[in-house]
Amino acid sequence: MDRQTDWQFLDDRGRLATSDGRPERVVTYIQAGATLWEHGIRPAGLFGSNHDGDGPDPVKAGSLPLDGIGYLGSGAALDADALLRGDPDLVVAVTYGGGQVYGLDPDTAKHLEERVPLVVLDVGQGQSLGDVRARFAALARALGAAQDTAGAVALARATARLRALAHDTAARQPLLALSPASADSAHLARPHSWPDLRELTAFGLDLVSPRGGAGTNWLTADWSYVAELSARVLLVDARVNAYPLDALRDNAAWRTAASVARVVPWNPEEPHSDGAHARFFDRVADAVEGAGGGGA
């Protein structure tokens, strides 16, 4: 793709980001950076969310090589000046709806956008995985990436595999997605709130939907409730802010739940590319097969 003399991209807030030329120093929210890397675009810098610490979360980073890419901070330590340290010519962030830039204070986002083009893509529950993949692919192409043919082939294969498992009565297994909260409790995901879980449901897989409680995205419950659900596949949040599974070795309820299930590391902020989603679908398919069906 030839260098453009005038560059523009309409983001999911309906705002047009413009630049004299195609941006080359792109600072991104870590999930967005991991997605662009899947398309061959290397970020110049990364930032995290209020859930992150002083360094980048390697789970959120996916296959992104973190060596040599500056981490600009997260939470209260992250302001417009920190984001501008790397002299970016574009910042890419995400929103979970309503146009609020995830991980940035509204004033920080406002001051940032006054000084550098800002593209915000919606990854919230109102979007399908396909919609989000298409938007990131469009941005990547605008930044000079080629079409990801290999990723599309892998995604089609993984999707067909999951659909086949879902239609095989002997292979169907109940799945539960959760994020360990503490030694005593877990956040159980409500599948309708998460695009990747909704996609698994659309394929025909049986995802456990926890009942009751006030949470929109999660139901917080004790580990004994997790064990009672008897899910055969557990999608367990592996991000650094989740309570570590190693610390649950002496928890009898967790041991009961895990003893009857295949445990799959789950990244609720998976990179939004064909290849990354294909790998996620294949991990789920492996677990469903291993839990009792599909030729394992």
Image: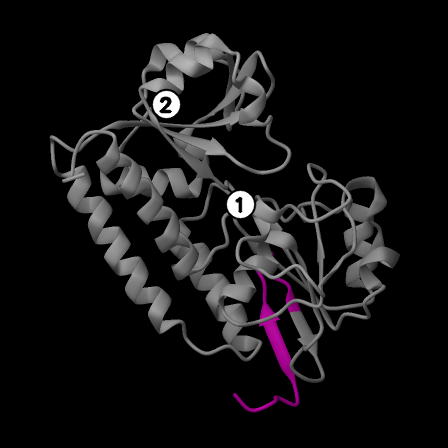
Amino acid type at image mark 2: Ser
Give the residue drawn at x 58%, y 76%.
Answer: 143
Q: Quadrant of residue 146?
A: bottom left
Please state which of the two labelled residues, at mark 2 or mark 1, is closer to the viewer: 1
Q: Is residue 193 magenta?
A: no
Looking at the rendered structure, the kind of residue marked 1 is Glu
Q: Position of residue 32 (x, y in %)?
A: 59, 57
Above or below residue 192? Residue 75 is below
**Coordinates of residue 224 in the picture (x, y in percent):** 45, 8
Instruction: Give how far across and how far down residue 169 sits, in percent.
Output: 11, 31
Residue ID at (38%, 55%)? 130
Q: Which image quadrant: the C terminus?
A: top left
Within-10-Å neighbours for mark 2: few <14, some 14–19, many 20+: some
Q: Main secondary structure of the magenta part?
A: loop
Q: Are marks 2 and 1 in contact (CB under 8 Å)?
A: no
The vertical placement of 143 against 86, above or below, is below
State how far apart marks 2 and 1 are (Cα): 20 Å
Q: Which residues are magenta?
A: 1-16
Q: Is residue 12 visible?
A: no
* Residue at point 31%, 58% (across, down): 155
| Label ID, residue 269 | 1
The answer to whether residue 160 is visible is: yes
Helix, strand or loop for disc 1: loop
For residue 72, side relative to residue 52 (left or right): right
Answer left or right for 234 relative to 206: right
Q: Which mark is residue 209?
A: 2
Q: Nearer the viewer, residue 100 or 89?
A: 89
User: Around disc 1, counting alpha carbons within 10 Å, would you say few (fewer than 14), some (14 to 19), or many (20 or more)?
Assistant: some
Residue sitting at x 65%, y 67%: 43
Report whether 87 appears left or right of 36. Answer: right
Q: Residue furthest right?
A: 81
- Looking at the image, tell me whether mark 2 or mark 1 is earlier in sequence order: 2
